Amino acid sequence: MPGIPGFYTATGVGTPIAAGKEAKIFNGKEYLLEEGIVGDFALVKAWKADTLGNLVYRKTKSGLIF
């Protein structure tokens, strides 16, 4: 699974949503472990694309010149 598999959040602490979830205390504040969500696809808007899927965006800098 690519991406973030899980993260801690204070949202839901002390509510029925917290039942059965792992809780941990950081710096005296309680947090719940939430599983990350995984998308099957994404819509991306770009200016140009080639057959390999490389995208070019308008009005962005293409690279740094030293």
Image: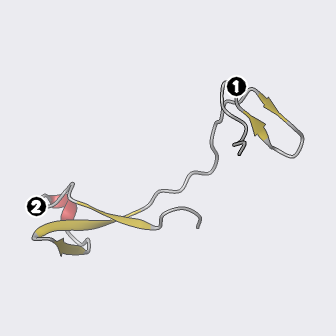
Residue at 48% x, 63% y is: 4
Mark 1 closeness class: few <14, some 14–19, many ≥20 residues within 10 Å: few
**23 and 56: which is toward the camera:** 56
**10 and 17: which is toward the camera:** 10
Q: Secondary structure at mark 2?
A: loop
Residue 28 in percent (x, y) is at: 9, 71
> In this image, 20 relative to 55: left or right?
left
**60 and 45: which is toward the camera:** 60
Residue at 21% x, 75% y is: 24
Q: Decide: is 45 above or below 40.
A: above
* Residue position marked by numbered label 2 in the rendering: 14
Task: Give the label, 2 or 1, closer to the camera.
Answer: 1
The quarter of the picture where residue 62 lies is top right
Q: Which mark is residue 58?
A: 1
Q: Amino acid at mark 1?
A: Arg
Mark 2 closeness class: few <14, some 14–19, many ≥20 residues within 10 Å: few
Residue at 64% x, 46% y is: 41
Q: Which mark is residue 12?
A: none
Q: Decide: is 20 above or below 41.
A: below
**Which quadrant of the figure contains the C terminus?**
top right
The quarter of the picture where residue 22 lies is bottom left
Q: Secondary structure at mark 1?
A: loop
Residue at 21% x, 73% y is: 23
Residue 54 in percent (x, y) is at: 80, 43
Gap in Å between the C-alphas at discs 2 and 1?
46 Å
Residue 48 in percent (x, y) is at: 80, 29
> In this image, 25 relative to 59: left or right?
left
Residue 31 in percent (x, y) is at: 21, 66
**21 and 6: which is toward the camera:** 6
The quarter of the picture where residue 45 lies is top right
